[in-house]
């Protein structure tokens, strides 16, 4: 897949996650058409949302829009906040055996009283397109093929496209969540990077970060990483996204990295928005296509 990006003399090149995601979605749409011609089956993605969190509702609707754009079928299950654990698990059980469903995603976070670990692990691993269940997480840790969490996968695709061969590079992941940080570190290890993971107990993370050729930041703490963290010429992937209020009363989206400072030092950097975010949904579609192949053709694979 071709790479595009913009740069100004003295500033880091912008990594165009939005453009990359659009091209990836077009490729997936072609795969969907070929798959249907071969099997008369259209990949189906079921998304389950419990409660009425406004941000989650917007995100889920965008997923449905992009699913249709790729030529897939979208099955939305909007459940009330009063849904019990038993009711949610029963729905997942029905989706697990539904032949029209090839991917299942339960939108997190869940309302209080629902166990996200139990819910995630109730999903058939072959349909776990978020890649968060213990089977897919274990396969990733062991270096085996499986379904990889969408956001780390999107970061890796951007890195391989913009950086190229990652072998031997020093990489640092700031944040150790099960959703991004840990699987990101595993993917970078698989690519041959020397990987450091910084977390809340890490001492002097700035000094460690300044040794990194690749810096992936996923903490949810806006403005955590300043220019002094960044090695000159490094590639910076900013996964974080927060809405902050400005002095004039308006709001804007920002990442975990102080963008203006980082861009003067880094070689390449993802903007917020328009960087990692679009890649997450595109990789969800990629994972759904992968799951459909495995279910229909019995084909293994994955990153």
Image (cartoon, helix red, strand yellow):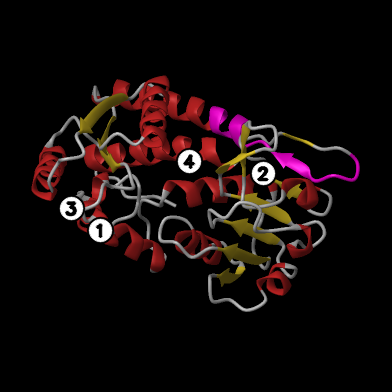
Near-viewer residue (84 or 239): 84
Residue under circle 3?
122
Residue under circle 4?
280
Residue under circle 1?
117
The residue stretch that appears in magenta: 9-23
Q: Residues within 10 Å of mark 1 (few under 14, many from 20)?
A: few
State which tag comes first along the sequence, 3 or 2. 3
Whether residue 17 is in magenta: the answer is: yes
State yes or no: discs 3 and 2 in contact (Cβ < 8 Å): no
Q: CA distance from mark 2 to mark 1?
A: 31 Å
Secondary structure under tag 3 reads helix
User: Dividing the image into 4 quarters, which one contains the N terminus?
Assistant: top right
Label ID, residue 56: none
State yes or no: discs 1 and 4 in contact (Cβ < 8 Å): no
Near-viewer residue (117 or 101): 117
Note whether 244 is above or below 217 in the view shown. above
State yes or no: discs 3 and 1 in contact (Cβ < 8 Å): no
Q: CA distance from mark 4 to mark 3?
A: 22 Å
Label ID, residue 270: 2
Q: CA distance from mark 1 to mark 4?
A: 21 Å
Q: CA distance from mark 3 to mark 1?
A: 9 Å
x then y, percent, for residue 206: 71, 70
Residue 206 seen in render: yes
The residue located at (59%, 32%) in the rendering is 18
């Amino acid at each position: 897949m071709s790479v595009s990006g913009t740069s100004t003399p003295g500033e880091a090149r912008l990594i165009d996650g939005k453009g990359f995601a659009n091209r990836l979605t077009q490729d997936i749409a072609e795969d969907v058409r070929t798959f249907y011609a071969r099997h008369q089956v259209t990949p189906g993605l079921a998304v389950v949302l419990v409660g009425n969190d406004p941000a989650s509702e917007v995100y889920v609707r965008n997923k449905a829009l992009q699913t249709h754009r790729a030529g897939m079928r979208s099955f939305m299950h909007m459940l009330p906040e009063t849904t019990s654990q038993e009711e949610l698990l029963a729905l997942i059980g029905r989706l697990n055996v539904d032949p029209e469903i090839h991917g299942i995603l339960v939108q997190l976070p869940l309302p209080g009283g629902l166990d996200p670990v139990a819910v995630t692990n109730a999903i058939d691993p072959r349909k776990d397109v978020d890649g968060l269940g213990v089977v897919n997480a274990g396969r990733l840790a062991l270096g085996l093929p499986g379904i990889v969490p969408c956001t780390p996968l999107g970061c890796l695709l951007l890195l391989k496209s913009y950086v190229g061969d990652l072998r031997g590079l020093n990489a640092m992941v700031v944040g150790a969540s099960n959703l991004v940080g840990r699987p990101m570190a595993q993917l970078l290890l698989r690519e041959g990077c020397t990987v450091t993971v910084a977390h809340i107990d890490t001492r002097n993370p700035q000094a460690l970060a300044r040794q990194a050729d690749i810096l992936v930041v996923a903490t949810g703490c806006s403005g955590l990483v300043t220019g002094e963290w960044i090695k000159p010429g490094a590639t910076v992937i900013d996964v974080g996204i927060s809405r902050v209020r400005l002095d004039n009363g308006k709001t804007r989206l920002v990442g975990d990295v102080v963008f203006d400072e980082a861009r003067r030092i880094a070689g390449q950097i993802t903007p917020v928005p328009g960087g990692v975010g679009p890649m997450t949904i595109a990789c969800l579609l990629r994972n759904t296509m992968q799951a459909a192949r495995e279910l229909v053709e019995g084909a293994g694979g994955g990153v």
